[in-house]
Structure formats: structure tokens, C-alpha cells
Amino acid sequence: MKRRANRRKLVGLVVSDTMDKTVVVRVERLVQDPRYKKYVRRYSKYLAHDEGNACKIGDQVQIIEHRPISKRKRWMVQETLAKTARG
């Protein structure tokens, strides 16, 4: 049996859920400015597959690396860590 390599996991916030079975997840990271040594927030957006359309805007989710599903989708929602209070 083939062993699957360790896949990367990221935690981020859902910023868009308008597409079918797809969410846009914004992942934040801290980067130190080389000159001033101050930490600055940097963001990246990832398209992630959400099979059941369960994620809503504002949810905190964990995404995991996945085989290519479409042109830009290479991530899948593994679990929802925190639901948003929006009703």
C-alpha cells in the first residue's frame, strides 16, 4: 500500500462562500520586517473544496493540501474550528 506524504495544514477565515462547493479562505502569517524588525501581517487567499457547502463567511476552518480539483483549487476543508455568530 502506498504511503501518503505529510500534507500541509493551514488555519484561516472563510471570506467568501458564493461558489458551489468552494470557499475562499484567508490565511494570516506574521513576517518580520528585515529593516525595522517589526512583525507585519501578511495574507494569502486559497480556494478550498467544501463538499457539503457547510462553511459560511466568518467561520474559522482548517484546510489541508489535496490533489488538484480544478485550475486553482488544491486545498480541501478538513474541519470547521469555530462557527461564526452571524445568523
Image (cartoon, rainbow, N blue to C red):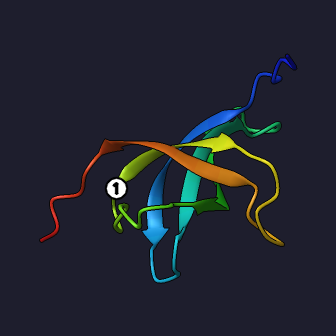
> Quadrant of the rendered structure where residue 25 is?
bottom right
Q: Which residue is mark 1?
A: 59
Indicate the amino acid at tag 1. Answer: Asp
Please give the name of the residue rendered at 83% of the width and 23% of the height, measured from the top-left corner: 5
Front position in the image: 56 or 27:
56
Please give the name of the residue rendered at 61% of the width and 51% of the height, measured from the top-left corner: 76
Task: Count how many numbered circles sit on residues in the image.
Answer: 1
Q: Quadrant of the C terminus?
A: bottom left
Residue 61 vertical position relative to residue 5 in the rendered view, above or below: below
Front position in the image: 32 or 37:
32
Q: Quadrant of the N terminus?
A: top right
Residue 74 vertical position relative to residue 86 in the rendered view, above or below: above
Residue 2 appears left or right of 42: right
> Quadrant of the rendered structure where residue 32 is?
top right
> Quadrant of the rendered structure where residue 46 is?
bottom right
Residue 12 vertical position relative to residue 17 in the rendered view, above or below: above
Residue 70 location in percent, x, y?
79, 70
Residue 31 location in percent, x, y?
70, 38
Note whether residue 33 is visible: yes
